[in-house]
Image (tube, rainbow, N blue to C red):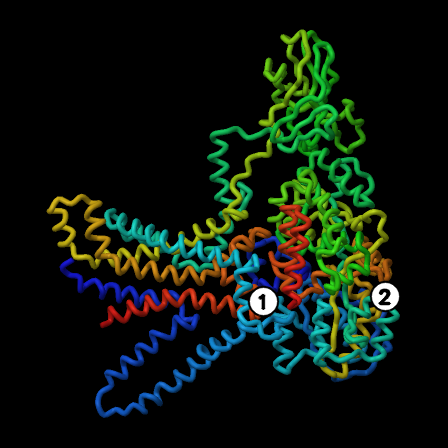
Amino acid sequence: MTKDAELPSAGARTEESVLPVEGGTSPPVGVPPVGGRATARRRQAPPGESRWIAGIFLLPAGIFLGAVVFYPFVYTVIRSFFKDGPSGETAGFAGLGNYVDIFTQPDSWVAFRNNVLWVVIVPAVVTILGLLFAVLTERVRFSSAFKIILFTPMAISFLAAGITWSLIYVDEPSMGLGNAVVTGVHDAFSSSTSYPGLHPLNDTVLKGSPAKGYTTVKPVSPGSPALLPITGLDLTSPPPNARQAQQPASGPGVSGVLWNDFKLGGGGKSGVIDHGELGVPGVQVQAVKNGNVVATTTTSVDGSFAFPSLTSGSYTLHLPHGDFAPAFAGVSWLGKYLITPSIMIAYLWIYTGFAMVLLAAGMAAIPRDALEAARIDGATEWQVFRRVTAPLLSPVLLVVFVTMVINVLKIFDIVFILQQPAGGNAKYANVLAVQLYTDYGNQQFGAASAVGILLVILVIPAMIFQVHNFRKENR
Amino acid sequence: MRMKSKRVAITGLALASLLSVAACGGGSSNSPKANASQSGGGSSPTASGPNLKGASFDILGQWTGGEQAAFQAVINAFDQQTGATGHYTPAAGGDEAGVLGTKVAGGTPPDIAILSLPGAIAEYAKPGKIYPVSSAVQSAVNSNFSSEWGTLGSYNGKMYCVPVDAANKSTMWYNAKLFSNAGISSPPQSWDDLIKDGKTLSASGVQVPISVGGGDGWTLTDWFENVYLRTAGLQKYDELTQHKIKWTDPSVATALNTLKQIWGDPQLIGSPQQAVKVPFTSSVDNVFKANPSSALVYEASFVATTITSDKDPAKVGVDAKVFPFPSVNGSQPVVEASGDFACAFTQNKAAQPFLAYLASADAAKLLVGTQGSGFLSVNKNVPASAYNDTTSAQLAQQMVKVGNDFRFDMSDQQPAAFGGTPNKGMWGDLQTFLTTGNVKATQQQLEKDASAAYGG
């Protein structure tokens, strides 16, 4: 704590590098620092130079700012109080109607809710991950190499990063990396189903569902073979070992045949084994008596099965669901529930390196003797981190956190891009900036203005904090 | 690639095409070989056209690729007849509405622009930005088109624009091989047959018999509009289009319940959660790719363009066949259509003669007959033989045959906030309906969104 005075300067340097990253596009970001610098310069003006000369030099900049920042801002505020007609014109005074709509219309309400989620989750996680990597990379040998790798995503545009991640999130395991991993892991632990999509044409013989399996409606007794028709086998590429189904011979025990009651080109008779109709091989068949499975067998290549040991009584035959359930298709990354977390992950991938570099720079400025003194006094590494590193680093942590809050409030590009492959689920990822863009595209200028002003209002506290910090450290 | 580019333009950007790789191959793969000499009439330079030597005019549109080549052939023929010089420019970035709006606002409108939304015609006619057509143009339109098409190009009883091409949005495309595998010899004529055949296809091993491209909400609005046209009739359709009746009307419930017979059956459309993610181009590919997972897809005549732009395209008319959207409860044949209109923005002396030429059968024959054009015309005097393939001819004849019993795409006539925004308004509400199947909630949400968009 002895060299407290040194840290702010580190913080101030960071601050300088932070501001340009945000971009100067939104009005409240650009204005205050410029005004601040101008005042400072005026105060330091050497005696003899009159104020009006300074005024003349400032005039062009003043006019420019007025035209591109002040006027649009005021106009936006005014426009947000007016209703929208069908094609962009104003349709009467709305009062706060457009603002109320943000919270009552489902789309914009989802957008607001998602923005809150983003602000609550992302800056904290970015800061924590950044700190983690900063601390860890400091301890490894090729720390610069690690830092470069982690920082690389920052060099990629949001557009490119978004498209990359949209490929990762593709549903088909053969195309999307995400689901390739998930299904790979899943299939390593459980076998995949053999006949997804197979179903009885009607429920006269077999009843049930793919999730429960199918059960015979009538009981089966030994001596009278059961004919179990099922449909849905892919006839253009049937299982290579499947053979023409045969009328089962009546043997001593319970027996039957499970066959695909549909032949290529149609025309077969329902419930009858026609020429060209294949048996369904390799399906598990259970004989059930009073709710208990008494025997289990598997269908052969022509679909026939037999329980030679069951020579008396009557049984229900059950085909367990394992063979029919739809194949595990992985995770719906861009589905209703996961789409926002998925986009957040892509965002973290981009920004963690950024936080790490800033925090590593901050850590480099921490005096080594303070750390060593603590270690000599017997502090564990965790205690050193908790009691010395973290407090000394807190100004930088704060800068990173607040910068992320501002960035995240304005989040647009990566959300917009990852919404494209999500189809009808895109609406669940809506955020305020995207809402503003859609309203604007629909020439709903009043609604768009209200969203814009709401965003400004949300960003202002963070901005004030940032500027305040900046001033304090400059002093 | 035209399709619904005006809608895509709202989300803007080449981005969409960057993401859906299949979508961008489109127009450019058609060899743009304008073949002006192919037409039956009008190729002789001494034909009856007026003498417009030295006149020069520009046309703004959004056609590129094969469509541009076909339109250029029309311009060339006109130039040859009259001595005028026409320049066609496709709007930069495919955003014709934006480019045109800027040009008009800046006081330098093109002499002629192609508009695809009837609403835009009214928007430009009201402040006098477009000029009414001459009597020659009017009589050409009246003699070559059914009166409803003339009405669509009119505002306040005055004709401003002439129909150029049209899309038939009541078409079901099917994989002929999968149909014959399932033993279906003739395509379904009625809604009940469609459901029955869907089940048969499912039994024959087709995973998802009916492919629904719910990822692009406009395919769902077209489904709904076709069913509504058939269950509620033309008059109700007009009333709903103009929001004269509410979306909570019982007729809407009937249409949604009818739709639900197919949309709510996983055996027919697979998992709705999955269907709502499938974009239009994939919904077509799923039917016509090498290992098809579906046998049937509903959309419009421009599905042909999507099929032929595939890497290994199915043959339209042989592998990929088409039948009209089936009748529901014995409804009469009706067609949902969309189309493009040419409007004069200046009083250039070549503008009206060119519009008159566009409305003629000669121009229409060139438009549909140029290799790779993909255009359909609703000009009554274009014979089926003018088309390059029988499928296009069949689809065009279907539109001509219904006369005035066609309706323009409903969502295209709505304010963009309700009828033209991805995942919002009508698009979004029907996507929700696809996954939930809740008729009442969908109706209420549709009504809420519609009245908000109408500024109610």
Q: Residues within 10 Å of mark 2 (few under 14, many from 20)?
A: some
Label 2 marks which chain's residue?
Answer: B
Residue A20 against residue A187 in the figure, above or below: below
Q: Is residue A202 left or right of residue A328?
A: right
Quadrant where the C terminus of chain A sits is bottom left
Mark 2 and mark 1 in contact? Answer it, CB < 8 Å.
Answer: no
Of the pair A417 and B440, the residue shown nearer to us: B440
Numbered mark located on residue A138 in the image: none
The kind of residue tagged 1 is: Gly
**Real-space Cα separation, disc 2 to disc 1, in angstroms:** 35 Å
Residue A32 against residue B299 in the figure, above or below: below
Q: Is residue B165 left or right of residue A237?
A: right
Quadrant where the N terminus of chain A sits is bottom left
Q: Residues within 10 Å of mark 1 (few under 14, many from 20)?
A: some
Query: Dot 1: what SS?
Result: helix
Q: Quadrant of residue A401?
A: bottom left
Of the pair B11 and B39, the residue shown nearer to us: B11
Q: Quadrant of residue B383?
A: bottom right
Q: Is residue A237 left or right of residue B376?
A: left
Q: Position of residue B279 (x, y in %)?
A: 62, 51
Query: Dot 2: what SS?
Result: loop
Q: Residue at x 48, y 57 (%)?
A: A414
Q: Position of residue A410 (x, y in %)?
A: 44, 63
Q: Position of residue A459 (x, y in %)?
A: 41, 65
Q: Residue at x 75, y 53 (%)?
A: B250
Q: Position of residue A147 (x, y in %)?
A: 31, 53
Q: To which residue does mark 1 refer? A: A441
Q: To which residue does mark 2 refer? A: B146
The kind of residue tagged 2 is: Ser
